Amino acid sequence: MADSFTRGESSHQGRPEPLRSSQLPENASTTTQVVLVMDGLKEFTIKSLKWVLENISASGGINVTLLGAMPWLNIPLSAKTWQGIWAVGFEELAMAKEQGDEWKSDSKYVKLQAILDLCKRFGVNVPQKEVVMGYPLKLMVVEKLKSLNASWVVFDRHQRRDMEFIADKFPCNMVMINENDEPVIIKMQPLTSGEFTSGGSPASFLPSPL
């Protein structure tokens, strides 16, 4: 049986085409677990979350987990990284707001508030926010996806080199948000036990190397 992850096609056929909204499977009535896998060492952006809320949440209820993936860090890098959103939770934001308006000048709190505002706008629960750190990182990401029971995984473009490994090890729908902020199919699960339905069988693409 052919693997649903088509290896190497895009390296010969150019960059994969962006995912069209008509290609998205419709979710069942049960809540769908969506995990956004991001490079924890890069500047956090809200674009991947916005795409998830505009597209996946439109066909059913979802729970979202923001997963920051990063290797073990030396102390200087660790200190720099933990100044970002991965170092604090939404509880800390709530406490900071109780102290006045100073939180508005702290970029990590401003970004957390933007996440909350966006989720509220789409009627989605406050997302979980987790970090996975260690070696081999790609295997640790797979184990975390299993523990979260993910139905959808949305990668930022910085995860490009590990996506084939993860797609081989973990069965679910996978999409990458590319450098043009467009969604690209990595893998789509076939119809099984009514969890997903689809009007067609979308092509699977391996993104071209950077």
Image (tube, grey):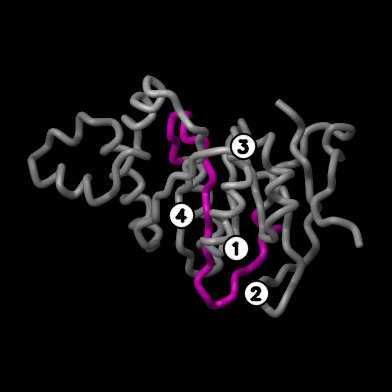
Vertical arrangement, residue 159 with respect to residue 34, above or below: above
Q: Earlier in the sequence, mark 4 or mark 1?
A: 4
Q: Quadrant of residue 87?
A: top left
- Quick one: SS at disc 2? loop
Residue annotated with mark 3: 159
Q: Amino acid at mark 1?
A: Ser
Distance (Cα) linking label 3 and label 2: 27 Å
Q: Are marks 2 and 1 in contact (CB under 8 Å)?
A: yes
- Quickly name the residue at label 1: 151
Q: Which label sits on residue 195?
A: 2
Q: Secondary structure at mark 4?
A: strand
Is the residue marked by circle 1 packed among few (<14), some (14-19), or many (20+) residues within 10 Å? many
Percent across and percent down for residue 35 are 52, 54
Residue that extends furthest to the right in the rendered view of this protein: 1
Dot 4 or dot 3: first in sequence order is 4
Q: Within 10 Å of the Cα at label 3, are there few (<14), some (14-19), or many (20+) other Cα atoms?
A: some
Mark 2 crowd level (few <14, some 14–19, many ≥20, 10 Å Cα): some
Type of amino acid under label 3 = Gln
Q: Residue 65 got which mark?
A: 4
Q: Which segment is the magenta one?
A: 21-46
Q: How far apart are labels 4 and 2 at the CA level?
A: 20 Å
